[in-house]
Image (cartoon, helix red, strand yellow):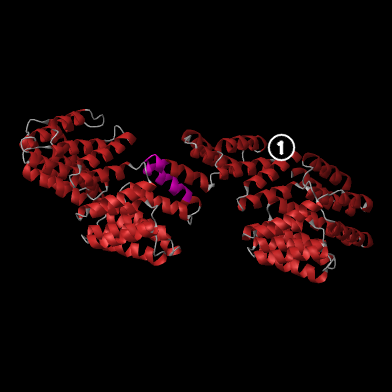
């Protein structure tokens, strides 16, 4: 650019020898920039070397025949009026130079000067319009190109350029119409066909796009852009075999083609062939090592393979290359969500919102991250922000309803769910959430009706099978078992369904089926706490107390204090077979309710145990676990004090009570700090 600046300065001083020398040096440094060659042609014309100027224009392969013809006409005008020739060539060179530097206002002013010097020639107007395009002033560009078409309808390039202007203004139909006009003027135009095919692909007209690209390949069988576009069309139509053929053809025609390897990587990712995707990405990066699109696909492929360290490295590379590339932040945030680090994810979502505040995925992700952190008021604030702009987003209403439920605002949760169902009446997530709201309100028949509706319309939705627990709670054991059996047809490895069904068999006192069902769960998860406790409870209900104690003792993921408390409870119940069956049923029901997050019912079951076994600590400790989880600190403190009365020398209850007081103290300190602020 320094060389070009010097060339134009010497042109203005009419020192053409120096001007030509500097321009030739610039072309030597960047021979791929055609505008530098146009500048040299203008300098030759100003120096009255018209043949050299024509030769220079003729050598520019990116200019169409009609553009070259129009330029030759301009050179002839310069020849006829030497003074104006010097003026217009200097103005055009200043405009081209200013545009290269990004000084668009200066470039536009120089173009307008050039237009006024020879108003009948189209070249200054073409450069003016293209400068408007570079400055993202598409409407101004459209006006100039439209005027050019009126004055010179035979000038095919104007139709093509007007198509680009319409495309920049997001007027796709008008763009297609213009490119069709190019074909009316030049029936063999390859660029126009490629442009139309690309637009048809964007509009989803796969068959029409395929036909148009096919015409390009007939005209130019080795056109790499055409093979690339046809491959993209085939990806859009999920015809991966044909897409691979086209991308392979590109690589065959040009082994170092970036787009060929990049699109092959995209296609392999879509196919789920992540190893091949990774390999193609690596090849593409050899050509363009800083291409963020490739790093992004590579990172996503690593994510799919579970290679999260590699994925994080790729997304961090992207941010180092281009800190405004939002998908990198979103992918990193999603990795942290899956790693149960919502606080880190929130930082990343906020970083992407700084780049683009209206990024819905980031704001929705931030809301869900806040919800996972227990900051439900913050989450609701994010969801409400989205709804202001996107009032028809079903998922946002669902997430907002969950946060309202977590805050205990059941009526507001109900309103949010009804908004979601107003948009999608049979959305299974929203309707199952409505069922849970009815459970909170103790409207069990209504909850059952909602989940029956979900199960009928979406039998492959796992949440529908919570219906089995509602049937169990209602004492409809056969319906409960039938529901769980249906669920296991769709989810044969779902431990919760197997255990829930075992519990219902136990409540029916069908211990043979209860054991057989529980063994299925243990086959899937040998060390699982729930299946092992279920089996211990079944054995206890049957009166096999020693076997039950042995089963508890063999549990790997159960603490020693918990084991002792559980075994003490079994010993207590062993004195009375009827009592043992009753307690075992309460224990199993409590586990089932807890695992299905129906904590109110679980607490009720443990309370029933403390009534018949008031001196046994296990049920009290289980209550503390639930009360702590559901943030009912005052009640948890009361139960801890009861445990201490039962066993004053045990450090466990004292430690648990201290932990609750500590959490309460932290909250009080936070409240005082906020108050002072």
* Residue at point 17%, 44% (across, down): 509
Q: Is 642 one of the magenta-colored residues?
A: no
Q: Would you say 505 lies left or right of 134 here? A: left
* Residue at point 92%, 49% (across, down): 52
Q: Would you say 39 lies left or right of 78 here? A: left
The image quadrant of residue 445 is bottom left
Q: Can residue 135 be seen from the camera position used here?
A: no
Dominant secondary structure, magenta? helix
Q: Can residue 565 be seen from the camera position used here?
A: yes
Above or below: residue 275 compared with residue 436: above
Q: Secondary structure at mark 1?
A: loop
Residue span colored magenta:
336-352
* Residue at point 72%, 61% (across, down): 108
Query: x, y (%) of residue 384?
Result: 38, 60
In the picture, which quadrant includes the N terminus? Answer: top right
Query: x, y (%) of residue 598?
Result: 23, 50
* Of residues 140 and 181, the one drawn nearer to the viewer in this rendering: 181
Query: Residue beneath label 1, please?
Result: 256
Query: x, y (%) of residue 328?
Result: 51, 44
Above or below: residue 112 compared with residue 302: below
The image quadrant of residue 513 is top left
Query: x, y (%) of residue 343?
Result: 37, 43
* Residue at point 38%, 63% (across, down): 420
Q: How many residues crowd mark 1 within 10 Å: few (<14), some (14–19), many (20+)?
A: some
């Amino acid at each position: 650019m320094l060389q070009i600046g010097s060339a134009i300065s010497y042109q203005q001083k009419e020192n053409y020898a120096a001007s030509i020398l500097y321009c030739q040096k610039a072309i030597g440094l960047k021979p791929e920039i055609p505008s530098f060659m146009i500048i040299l042609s203008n300098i030759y014309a100003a120096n009255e070397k018209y043949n050299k100027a024509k030769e220079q224009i003729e050598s520019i392969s990116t200019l169409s025949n009609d553009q070259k013809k129009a330029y030759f006409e301009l050179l002839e005008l310069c020849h006829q009026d030497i003074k104006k020739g010097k003026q217009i060539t200097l103005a055009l060179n200043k405009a081209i130079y200013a545009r290269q530097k990004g000084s668009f206002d200066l470039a536009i002013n120089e173009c307008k000067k050039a237009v006024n010097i020879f108003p009948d020639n189209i070249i200054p107007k073409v450069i003016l319009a293209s400068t408007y395009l570079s400055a993202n002033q598409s409407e101004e560009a459209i006006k100039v190109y439209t005027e050019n078409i009126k004055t010179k309808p035979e000038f095919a390039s104007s139709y093509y350029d007007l198509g680009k202007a319409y495309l920049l203004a997001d007027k796709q139909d008008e763009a297609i119409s213009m490119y069709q006009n190019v074909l009316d003027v030049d029936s063999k135009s390859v660029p126009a066909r490629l442009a139309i095919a690309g637009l048809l692909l964007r509009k989803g007209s796969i068959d029409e796009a395929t036909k148009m690209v096919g015409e390009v390949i007939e005209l130019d069988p080795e056109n790499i852009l055409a093979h690339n576009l046809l491959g993209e069309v085939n990806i859009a139509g999920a015809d991966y075999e044909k897409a691979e053929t086209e991308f392979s053809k590109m690589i065959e025609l040009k082994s170092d083609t970036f787009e060929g390897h990049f699109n092959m990587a995209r296609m392999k990712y879509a196919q789920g062939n992540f190893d091949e995707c990774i390999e193609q990405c690596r090849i593409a990066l050899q050509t363009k090592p800083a291409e963020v699109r490739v790093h992004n696909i590579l990172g996503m492929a690593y994510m799919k393979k579970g290679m999260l360290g590699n994925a994080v490295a790729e997304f961090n590379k992207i941010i180092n290359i281009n800190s405004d590339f939002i998908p990198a932040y979103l992918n990193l945030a999603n990795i942290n969500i899956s790693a149960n680090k919502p606080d880190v994810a929130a930082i990343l979502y906020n970083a992407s919102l700084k780049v683009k505040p209206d990024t819905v995925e980031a704001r929705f992700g931030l809301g869900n991250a806040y919800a996972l952190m227990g900051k439900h008021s913050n989450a609701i604030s994010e969801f409400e922000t989205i709804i202001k702009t996107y009032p028809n987003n079903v998922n946002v209403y669902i997430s907002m309803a969950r946060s309202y439920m977590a805050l205990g605002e059941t009526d507001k949760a109900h309103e949010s769910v009804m908004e979601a169902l107003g948009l999608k009446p049979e959305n299974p997530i929203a309707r199952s959430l409505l069922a849970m709201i009815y459970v909170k309100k103790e409207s069990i028949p209504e909850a059952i009706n909602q989940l029956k509706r979900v199960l009928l319309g979406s039998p492959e939705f796992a949440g529908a099978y919570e219906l089995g627990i509602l049937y169990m709670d209602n004492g409809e054991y056969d319906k409960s078992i039938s529901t769980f059996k249906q669920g296991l047809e769709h989810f044969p490895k779902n431990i919760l369904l197997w255990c829930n069904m075992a519990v219902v068999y136990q409540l029916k006192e069908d211990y043979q089926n209860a054991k057989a069902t529980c063994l299925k769960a243990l086959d899937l998860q040998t060390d699982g706490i729930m299946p092992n406790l279920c089996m211990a409870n079944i054995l206890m209900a049957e009166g096999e107390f020693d076997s039950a104690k042995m089963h508890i003792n063999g549990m790997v993921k159960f603490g020693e204090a918990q084991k002792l408390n559980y075994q003490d409870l079994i010993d207590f119940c062993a004195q009375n077979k009827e009592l043992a069956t009753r307690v075992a049923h309460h224990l199993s029901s409590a586990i089932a309710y807890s695992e299905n997050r129906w904590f109110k019912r679980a607490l009720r079951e443990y309370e029933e145990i403390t009534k018949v076994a008031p001196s046994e600590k296990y049920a009290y400790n289980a209550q503390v676990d639930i009360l702590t989880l559901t943030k009912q600190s005052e009640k948890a403190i009361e139960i801890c004090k009861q445990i201490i009365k039962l066993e004053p020398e045990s450090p466990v209850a004292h430690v648990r009570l201290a932990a609750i007081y500590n959490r309460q103290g932290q909250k009080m300190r936070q409240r005082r700090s906020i108050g002072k602020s």
